[in-house]
Image: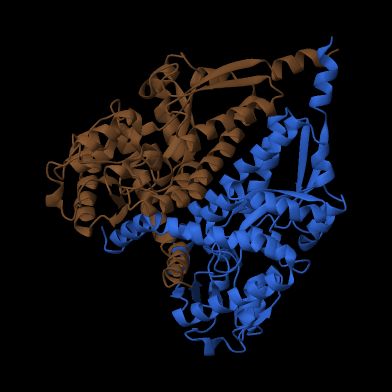
Chain colours: A blue, B brown
C-alpha cells in the first residue's frame, strides 16, 4: 500500500546511547534520565531506543560534551557548568553565583530567549540542548568549624568547583577538586576543612555529617542548578519531526520529575540529619556581601574580554533584574507570610 | 507484510476535542494548550489530532468537567477549583488559600502522592488528570479604596470566587460572581468595590487600572494556581500505550511553557501598570492573620464532614508542613538575600 513507505520513513528504528555525568546513586537525577529514555521508547512504540549509561561507563563524567561533539555518543545528561574550562559561558545555563532561582532560570530558558542564545553558542560544539531538571537551591556544604567572617575563610580548604570556587578564591578560600568517593576520608583526616555537594537528599548518602557537623545554607553559588540534555547537532537535525517532538516532550517530563523529586525528598533527609546532631548555620551577611561583590566583578571582567560570555550574560542580567522585581512582589510576600506563620507554630 | 496490522493497531488515527475553560485572550494559558495539541500531533505524525476550542465554543467554561464525564468532549484544560460546587475537594488540585507555592504544588502532585490521590477522586467523575501549568502566585486584585484593616472589608463587594470567596466572606466581604467582560463596567460604576483576576500580564488587558488604582498583593488565596488537563477515563484507558506516553509528555511540555510564560511576562506588564499610576499595596498583617484563621477553620470543618476532602487534605497538609520547613532553609534564604541586594540597588 501507499502508506507503508511513509510510515517507514517517519518512524525509523533508531538506537542512541546517553552518557550521563551522574552516578546511579544520585537517583533523583539518574532516575529522571531513565524516565526520559523510557518515555521516548513508549511514545515511539519501541522504535526510538535510548540506552542510559551512568557516569564513567562509556566516558568520564566531565568528557561527555566531547563525546557528544565527536559523535561518540548521541546524547548526554549533564550540567553545562562542568565545561567552564572550555568557556565560562557554559556556567550560565546551569547557574551563576547569586543568579536565578529554579522558576526564573526555567522562565529565562523557555520564554526569555535563553534557549535560543545557548543553542547558538552550543553550535560551536556541534550540540543542541533541552532542559534536564533542576536541584533547586543547594546547601552551602559541610564545615568542620564555624565560619562567621570573611577572615574565617582565609586559607580554608573547601571542596567546591566551578564558578563558586572562583568567587570563593577571591575571598581567600583554597578550592579543592576531589571526586565524590574521596570526600569523606579527606574531610575526616582534615585534608580539607569543608565540602559542598548538593542538598540534604544527596548529601546524606555521603555520610558527611559524621565528620563535619556544621551544615551551612544557602549555596549562594547555586541558587538553582539546571541540568541539560545535550544532543549531537547532526544527529538532532537528521531526526524525523515526530522524534524531535517526542524528545522535547519527554525531556520536559523528566525535567519536571527531577525537580519535583528533590523538592519532595529533601525535607525527610534534612530531618534525619538534624536528628543526628547536624547544626544548621546561615552564611553571615559579611560573607554573602563579599562574595556578591567578587561574583559580579568576575562576570564584568569576563564580559569585557569574552564576547561569547557577554552575548549571553547581558540579556541574562537584564532578565535577572526584571524577574527579581516581579518575584519580590506577589511570590516572595506569599512565601514570607506562610513561612512566618509556620515559624510561629500556626 | 506482518508489520502492517501492528502499526495500524499501535498508531491508530484518533481525533479528540479539547474544551478549554479559558478564552484566547488569556494567551499564556490558551497558548500552552495549543502547544500541547501541536506536540501530540507532531509526535504521532499527525495521527492523534486534538482540536482546541476556547471557553464557550463547545460548552460553557464551568461545564467542561460535565462534558468530559459525559464524553461530549474527550479532554478539557481547566482549573479543578471551578468545580467546588460539586465537592470542595476539587480545590486542592488547583489551590487552597495559604497553600502550596508553584514548586511545592508540583512536587506534591508529581512526587508527593497528590496525583494518585486525585486520580482516585476523579474516577468518580470518569476522569483522569495531568498537570496543565501554573500561574504562580497571583495578585490580590484591584480596589477602588485602600483596605487597611479587617473592618475595611465589612460589606466590601469583591469579585472573587472559589475558596478565596468563602474565606473572605468569613471576614465580612460580600463575594460577587461576575463574568470577565462585565468586570470593568461594574467596577467603574461602583456596583462592585474591588475585583481580582490573575496577575499583571492578564490583568493589564482588562484595563482595570483605569477604574481602581490600588493593586494589592499577594493573592493569599492563590499562592499558586495549578491547571489540569482532565481526560475522559474510558477514552484514556482505550488509548494505545504509545499515545498515553505522548499525552503525558506533551502535557509536561505545555505545563512548563505556561508557567514560564507567566514568569517571563508579568514583569513588563507590572512596569507598565506602575507607569500608569497604579499604587501597589501589600495586604496588612491583620487581614492576612484573620484570613489564615478563617481558611484553616474552613478546611478542618470540611474534613470533619467530607471523607473525600479529608482523604486528600490531610496528606496535603502534612506535605505542606514538610515542604515549608525545607523551602525555608536554602531556597527562601537565597531569594531573601538576592532580593535584598536588588532593593539596595546592587
Residue A175 image-quadrant placement:
bottom right
- Residue A14 appears in which quarter of the rendering? top right
Which residue shows up at 44% across the image and 36% down it? B227
Q: Is residue A343 above or below residue B216?
A: below
Place of residue B104 in the rendered image (x, y in percent of width and height, measured from the top left): 44, 50
Q: Position of residue A62 (x, y in %)?
A: 77, 63
Locate the N terminus of chain B by quadrant. Answer: top right
Work out whether residue A294 or residue B145 is closer to the camera in this orientation and state it: B145
Quick check: can you spot residue A346?
yes
Q: Position of residue B67 (x, y in %)?
A: 42, 17
For residue A69, side relative to residue B24 (left or right): right
Q: Which residue is situated farthest in the top direction here?
A: A1
Residue B67, compared with residue A281, is above or below; it is above
Q: How many marks?
A: 0
How far across and down, in percent of the image, does residue B22 sit? 43, 29
Residue A242 drawn above or below residue A98:
above
- Indicate the quadrant where residue A245 lies: top right
A30 vs B144, nearest the viewer: B144
| Residue at 53% over, 70% down | A220
Instruction: Judge whether residue A54 can be spotted in this image.
Output: no
Amino acid at each position: 500500500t501507499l502508506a507503508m513507505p511513509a510510515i517507514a520513513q517517519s518512524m525509523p528504528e533508531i538506537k542512541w546511547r546517553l552518557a550521563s555525568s551522574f552516578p546511579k546513586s544520585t537517583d533523583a537525577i539518574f532516575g529522571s534520565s531513565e524516565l526520559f529514555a523510557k518515555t521516548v521508547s513508549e511514545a515511539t512504540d519501541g522504535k526510538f531506543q535510548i540506552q542510559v549509561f551512568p557516569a564513567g561507563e562509556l566516558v568520564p563524567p566531565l568528557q561527555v560534551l566531547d563525546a557528544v561533539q565527536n559523535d561518540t555518543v548521541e546524547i548526554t545528561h549533564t550540567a553545562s557548568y562542568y565545561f567552564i574550562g572550555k568557556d565560562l559561558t557554559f556556567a550560565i545555563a546551569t547557574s551563576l553565583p547569586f543568579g536565578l532561582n529554579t522558576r526564573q532560570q526555567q522562565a529565562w530558558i523557555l520564554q526569555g530567549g535563553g534557549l535560543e542564545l545557548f543553542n547558538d553558542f552550543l553550535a560551536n560544539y556541534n550540540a543542541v540542548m533541552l532542559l534536564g531538571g533542576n536541584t533547586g537551591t543547594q546547601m552551602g556544604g559541610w564545615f568542620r568549624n564555624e565560619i562567621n567572617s570573611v577572615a574565617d575563610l582565609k586559607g580554608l580548604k573547601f571542596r567546591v568547583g566551578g564558578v563558586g570556587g572562583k568567587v570563593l578564591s577571591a575571598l581567600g578560600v583554597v578550592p579543592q577538586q576531589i571526586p565524590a568517593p574521596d570526600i569523606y576520608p579527606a574531610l575526616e583526616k582534615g585534608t580539607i576543612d569543608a565540602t559542598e555537594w548538593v542538598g540534604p537528599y544527596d548529601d546524606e548518602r555521603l555520610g558527611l555529617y559524621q565528620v563535619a557537623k556544621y551544615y551551612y545554607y544557602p549555596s549562594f553559588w547555586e541558587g538553582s542548578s539546571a541540568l541539560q540534555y545535550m544532543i549531537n547537532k547532526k544527529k538532532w537535525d537528521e531526526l524525523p519531526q515526530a522524534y524531535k517532538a517526542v524528545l522535547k516532550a519527554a525531556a520536559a517530563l523528566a525535567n519536571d520529575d527531577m525537580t519535583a523529586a528533590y523538592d519532595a525528598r529533601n525535607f525527610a533527609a534534612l530531618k534525619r540529619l538534624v536528628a543526628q546532631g547536624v547544626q544548621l548555620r546561615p552564611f553571615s551577611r559579611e560573607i554573602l556581601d563579599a562574595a556578591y561583590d567578587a561574583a559580579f566583578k568576575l562576570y564584568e571582567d569576563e564580559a569585557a574580554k569574552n564576547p561569547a560570555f557577554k552575548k549571553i550574560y547581558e540579556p541574562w542580567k537584564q532578565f535577572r533584574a526584571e524577574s527579581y522585581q516581579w518575584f519580590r512582589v506577589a511570590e516572595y510576600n506569599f512565601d514570607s507570610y506562610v513561612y512566618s506563620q509556620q515559624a510561629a507554630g500556626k
